[in-house]
């Protein structure tokens, strides 16, 4: 073989190796996306509920890493939870432990079938090669996509196809290493890796270069077909790979506060302690025959899984000490504690954007707080008007500033999710949030109008008649009940409450017209002046508009529950009209009895 032929063959084998690695990386990312759509969203939203139970945290971390096919993606979420103060460090450690276990599932998948170069003794063994299984899975997953229309079935088929592509990528890499045996003396090349320390450093450097422990282990499995990878080298390489993956945590924590950096340190300490313990055992067992045996790709997968399981069992009893070590290593600077507003806005962490289900859930928490502040302002203003009590201007203006800031921050945050690959559920949640945030901000604006009415009444010493004060109080009480139901509907995504809210909105509309008529009668009878009457009309107008926005929010929730994704204005009006027409007569009569008949001076029969 001349130099040019040798160069061409080397180049071809390198391209085959890189092509297999690229196909593997692509299939891995798409598999993670498909599994998240199928199973991951409810799990993602429930990660925060693991607080207080370390075993639930470990299980949730393992499932999350298995579904995303990446411990790094899970670690980004953990860093985000720590930075936002959502989870304490102890629970973050549980998620880290679980993520290390869950990421080993990929190696178990790629260990399926016989490797390239295996001596086939029968057609059955040939059909059980990695390549044959890959062909089967690609056919089972890819062909139904030509005619299947149902979204969930298509997503499931895409997941099966991606597993087939994973195995095909592994086959390409194995073939590249098998063919390289004609050109490279792998045994002599791998001899230095018999030194566990050199092998550990090599595994660390490979992971730093590739930036994925899963890809690094896959490359190691493909290399196993050369027959030059001993058990000693394989174990030490895996230890280095596990340490190398910690650098993704430090990249995610870069520029963040103390909590995020402490979580990244926890990841490093946990992996280093496990690696140090395993390396000590490995050094103590040097000379044992089995350490010189050739490691197959299945053995590498089992070593990877076993090491991470043993690391969890080793560290679990001492987790509080490990958390304390991370806190002492990176001490938080003395600073003023964050205000409640800042803590809420910290939930909109850009790291969550890679996991839309969690990002949207954080948006909902902030919007819920917006609703509470908006309705608190309405309550303060109406109470001040009715009871002539002193309104706390500082709290009111703080709430209003919070509402304006939240609207701007959430709308900006939603832009980061706009181009993400959103599932159908996330698309509906995205649209609902996009509309609802504006409604709550508008409620805050009408509360500000009421605040101005309150100031004018006090400055001009306007005195409403007893009847007028009573009527404003009744309308305010109806709105108070409506606001409570609106928040409950939004918090619980309960579209069934739209019946009650719609009935209340209709009663408040009638109340407004009734109070206007009664106000005109008082003017005609000389019981009220124009100076008093204009603020009265403005107040009931603002209350009615707030009720309209409450009704809008309930309809958005109803549309979300019904699976509507467009949320266009025509569809909105159609559903709003249907909701008003379809509430039960019982609710209508109930609210008329409570709020309308006292104004009319009627008694229930």
Image (cartoon, rainbow, N blue to C red):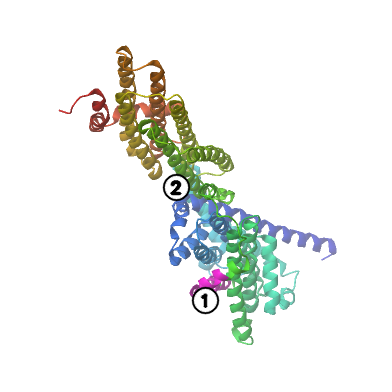
Does residue 573 show up magenta in the picture?
Answer: no
Please give the range of residues in magenta: 299-324
Most common SS among magenta residues: helix
Residue bearing the label numbered 2: 153
Quadrant where the C terminus is found in the figure: top left
Mark 2: secondary structure: helix
In the image, residue 445 sits, relative to residue 376, either above or below, namely above
Q: Is residue 339 left or right of residue 257?
A: left
Residue in the foreground of this view, choosing between 144 and 290: 290
Residue at (68, 63) in percent of width and height: 208
Farthest left residue in view: 605
Q: Is residue 552 left or right of residue 310?
A: left
The answer to whether residue 6 is seen in the rendering is yes
Q: Position of residue 130 (x, y in %)?
A: 56, 63
- Cα distance in 3D space between marks 1 and 2: 41 Å
Farthest top residue in view: 524
């Amino acid at each position: 073989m001349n130099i040019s032929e040798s160069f061409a063959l080397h180049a071809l084998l390198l391209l085959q190796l890189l092509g297999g690695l690229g196909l593997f990386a692509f299939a891995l990312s798409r598999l993670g996306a498909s599994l998240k759509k199928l199973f991951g969203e409810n799990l993602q939203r429930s990660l925060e509920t693991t607080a207080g139970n370390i075993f639930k945290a470990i299980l949730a971390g393992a499932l999350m890493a298995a579904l995303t096919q990446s411990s790094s993606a899970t670690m980004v979420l953990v860093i985000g939870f720590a930075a936002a103060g959502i989870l304490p460090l102890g629970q973050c450690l549980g998620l880290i432990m679980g993520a290390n276990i869950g990421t080993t599932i990929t190696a178990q998948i790629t260990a399926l079938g016989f490797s390239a170069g295996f001596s086939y003794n029968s057609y059955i063994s040939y059909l059980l090669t990695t390549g044959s299984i890959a062909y089967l899975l690609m056919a089972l997953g890819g062909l139904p996509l030509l005619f299947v229309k149902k979204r969930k079935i298509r997503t499931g088929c895409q997941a099966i196809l991606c597993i087939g592509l994973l195995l095909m990528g592994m086959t390409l890499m194995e073939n590249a290493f098998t063919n390289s045996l004609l050109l490279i003396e792998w045994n002599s090349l791998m001899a230095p890796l018999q030194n566990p320390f050199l092998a550990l450093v090599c595994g660390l450097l490979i992971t730093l270069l590739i930036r994925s422990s899963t890809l690094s282990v896959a490359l190691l499995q493909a290399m196993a077909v050369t027959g030059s990878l001993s058990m000693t080298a394989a174990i030490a390489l895996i230890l280095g790979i596990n340490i190398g993956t910690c650098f993704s945590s430090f990249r995610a924590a870069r520029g963040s506060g103390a909590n995020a950096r402490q979580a990244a340190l926890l990841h490093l300490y946990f992996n280093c302690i496990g690696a140090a313990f395993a390396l000590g055992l490995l050094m103590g067992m040097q000379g044992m025959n089995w350490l010189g045996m050739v490691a197959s790709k299945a053995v590498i997968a089992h070593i990877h899984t076993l090491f991470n399981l043993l690391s969890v069992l080793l560290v679990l009893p001492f987790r509080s000490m490990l958390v304390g070590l991370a806190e002492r290593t990176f001490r938080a600077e003395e600073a003023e504690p964050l205000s409640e507003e800042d803590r809420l806005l910290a939930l909109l962490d850009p790291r969550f954007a890679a996991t839309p289900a969690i990002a949207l859930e954080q948006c909902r928490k902030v919007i819920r707080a917006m609703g509470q502040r908006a309705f608190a302002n309405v309550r303060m203003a109406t109470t001040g008007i009715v009871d002539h009590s002193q309104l706390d201007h500082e709290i009111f203006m703080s709430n209003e500033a919070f509402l304006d800031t939240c609207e701007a921050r959430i709308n900006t945050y939603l832009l980061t999710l706009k181009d993400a690959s959103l599932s159908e559920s996330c698309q509906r949640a995205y649209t609902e949030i996009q509309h609802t945030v504006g409604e709550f901000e508008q409620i805050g604006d009408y509360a500000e109008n009421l605040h101005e009415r309150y100031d004018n009444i006090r400055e001009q010493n306007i005195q409403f008649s007893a009847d007028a004060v009573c009527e404003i109080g009744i309308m305010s009480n109806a709105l108070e009940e409506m606001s409570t139901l609106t928040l409950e509907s939004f918090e619980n995504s309960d579209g069934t409450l739209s019946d009650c809210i719609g009935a209340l909105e209709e009663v408040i509309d009638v109340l407004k017209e009734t109070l206007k008529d009664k106000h005109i009668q008082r003017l005609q009878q000389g019981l009220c002046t124009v100076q008093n009457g204009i603020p009265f009309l403005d107040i009931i107008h603002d209350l009615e508009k707030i009720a309209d926005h409450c009704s809008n929010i309930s309809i958005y929730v109803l549309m979300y529950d019904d699976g509507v994704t467009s949320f266009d204005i025509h569809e909105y009006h159609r559903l709003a009209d249907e909701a008003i027409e379809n509430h039960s007569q019982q609710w209508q009569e109930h609210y008329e009895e409570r709020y309308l008949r006292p104004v009319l001076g009627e008694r229930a029969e």
